[in-house]
Image (cartoon, grey):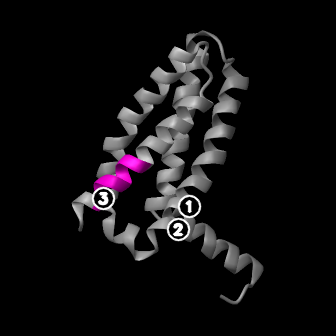
Amino acid sequence: MNRGLATSWAIGLGLFTGALVGTIVPSETGVQEVRQMAGFTLVFIPVLYAVVTSRWSYWRRTNSYIRFAVYQLSLLPAAYVLVRIAGLVFGSTGALGQVAEVVAALAAFAVATWMTFYGGADRAWEELIDRTDIEW
C-alpha cells in the first residue's frame, strides 16, 4: 500500500466531505458555517485515513476515481435528505435541532463510507442487475 497516496485520498475526501456537510447543516452566521466546515473536516480526515488504509485493496480493486464518484453520488443525496429530514422533524433552531442535524450529517457520512468502502455500491449494482435482467 502506498501510504502517501492513501493519505492524499483521505485528505481530499475529508476536505470535500467537511466542506459539503458543513454547508448543508444550517448555520446562523458565516463564522458558524466556517467552524462547522472545519470541525467536520477535522473529524472526517482521520476517520477516512483509517478507512482508506484498512480497505486499501478494496479501494484499489476498482479505479479510484470511480470509487470517488460513488462516494460523491452517495454522500450528496444522503446528506441533503437526512439533514433536511432532521431539520423538519426537530426544527433547525434550538439545541435539539442542531444536534439532530449534525447526527444526520454523520449518518450521511456513514452511508457514503459504507457505499464506497464496504460493498454497498457493489450490492446495489448486483441488485439492479438481478431485478432488471441486464446482461453485463
In the picture as drawn, the residue positioned furthest to the right comes out as: 132
| Dot 1 and dot 3 residues touching (CB under 8 Å) | no
Residue found at x 62% / y 22%: 26
Q: Is residue 108 above or below residue 39?
A: below
Look at 53% across and 49% down and name the residue there: 111
Q: Which mark is residue 70?
A: 1
Distance between mark 1 and mark 3 Cα atoms: 17 Å
Task: Determine the residue positioned at 29% across, 51% down.
Answer: 50
Stretch of the chain drawn in magenta: 5-12
Decide: few, some or many residues near mark 2? Use Cα within 10 Å; few <14, some 14-19, many ≥20.
few
Q: Nearer the viewer, residue 113 or 63?
A: 63
How dense is the environment of label 3, judged by Cα within 10 Å: few (below 14), some, or many (20 and up)?
many
- Residue at x-position 56% and y-position 38%: 20
Residue labelled with disc 3: 6
Q: Give the label on residue 59, or none.
A: none
Residue kind at label 1, given as amino acid type: Val
Quadrant assignment for the N terminus: bottom left
Q: Quadrant of residue 121?
A: bottom right
Image coordinates of residue 135 in percent, x first then y, are 70, 90
Does the CB distance between marks 1 and 2 fall below 8 Å? yes
Structural distance between the alpha carbons of marks 1 and 2: 6 Å
Q: Give the residue at the far top of this rendering.
A: 94
- Residue 98 in picture, x, y percent from top left: 57, 18
Question: Can you tell which of label 1 and label 3 is closer to the viewer?
Answer: 3
Q: Earlier in the sequence, mark 1 or mark 3?
A: 3
Is residue 119 in the magenta section? no
